[in-house]
Image (cartoon, grey):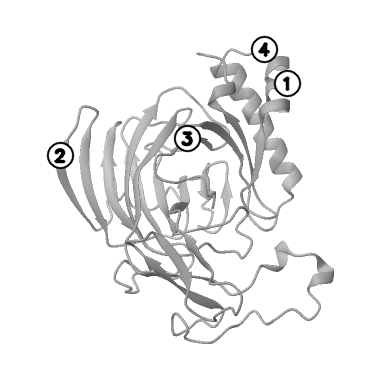
Amino acid sequence: MQASVLVFLIGTTLWGETHRVEATRFYHSFDHRHPVLARLKSGDRVETRTLDAGGYDHLGQKRAERGNPLTGPFYLEGAEPGDSIAVRIDRLRMNRDYGYTSFRLGLFSLAPESIEGLYPRAYRRGAVVADRDDIVKWRIDLAKNTVRLLEPVSKVHPLEFAARPMLGCIGVAAPGVFGPTSGISGSYGGNLDYNEIVEGTTVLLPVYHPGALLFVGDGHALQADGEPTGTGVETSMDLAMTITLRKKEPLENPRVETPTHIISIGSQPEFVSSLDRSIRIATSDMVNWLTRDYGMETWAAHLLIGYQGRYDVVTVAGSMALRLPRTALPKK
């Protein structure tokens, strides 16, 4: 069964075909039972759009219910359990002139004693959309590549920053009959909310079902480490990605490759889990990566991590990532 969709073949490259995909239906779970949006071959490139976390598109029109609506699933021919896929973010661009964020840090980010007398979570009903009172609007300047809070106005800081577009949700259909919501993450990826998933990054994901069934969504114009407010600057995105099959290369957790680093993610549901557990997941996965792919002795991998690794808080009370610079890696 295939979802209602417009798919255009717009070109062929040395590696594969380029498809323009316009979704008309969006989903809120990484579930293998959703109808396939488009079928691809390894090396194909997809150009598509994502909605913001509230379900609004590039024109500011409501297209889906709130809660990280997902574009997908994309079916990759030949992908089977025990394989993995590589998703390169070729292009990720903001496509409208506003975004929004929560008005307050999440209580998961604060010490209990600091909550006494905290300002209200609500700001003003209708400040961004009619049915919300807890979000504030940011102006996105596409020409300058900046974001600026419109209201309220600080007396001491303009709250204007350089944008750094990232993709919050990227994952495959979860293992077994589990259909997790688009609000959490796990070994399948999901709502990773990792601010290193930007243009030029490659995300590696395990395959649990035939075709892998890739979903994407939840673009942020900017997000700090840990997503401490529970949001990035939420907005819609134009996305181009190339998807490649890695046959018989199983993974246990999501990984990320950038031009400068390799990264293991200890991926688990955000805002409800212990960071020490996610550190252990990320570190164990990096040891496996170094010994299997780079041929390092286990003890050498431990020492390399011990003196060259850097940890990122991906989501507060959720996931951690371990980065190693490529300059510190042995040559393959």
Real-space Cα separation, disc 4 to disc 1, in angstroms? 10 Å
What residue did someone put label 3 on?
A: 258
What residue did someone put label 2 on?
A: 11
Real-space Cα separation, disc 1 to disc 3, in angstroms? 22 Å
Q: Which residue is drawn at 39% across and 67% down?
A: 140
Q: Circle 4 — which element? A: loop
Nearer the viewer's eye, disc 2 or disc 3?
3
Disc 1 marks a residue whose amino acid type is: Leu
Q: Residue at x 27, y 51 (%)?
A: 2
Q: Counting residues from the N terminus, which is met first, the one under dot 3 or under dot 4?
A: 3
Nearer the viewer's eye, disc 1 or disc 2?
1
Quadrant of the image occupied by residue 229? bottom right
Disc 4 marks a residue whose amino acid type is: Glu
Q: Residue at x 70, y 81 (%)?
A: 119
What residue did someone put label 1 on?
A: 303
Q: Counting residues from the N terminus, which is met first, the one under dot 1 or under dot 3?
A: 3
Q: Residue 41, relative to residue 32: is it above or below?
A: above
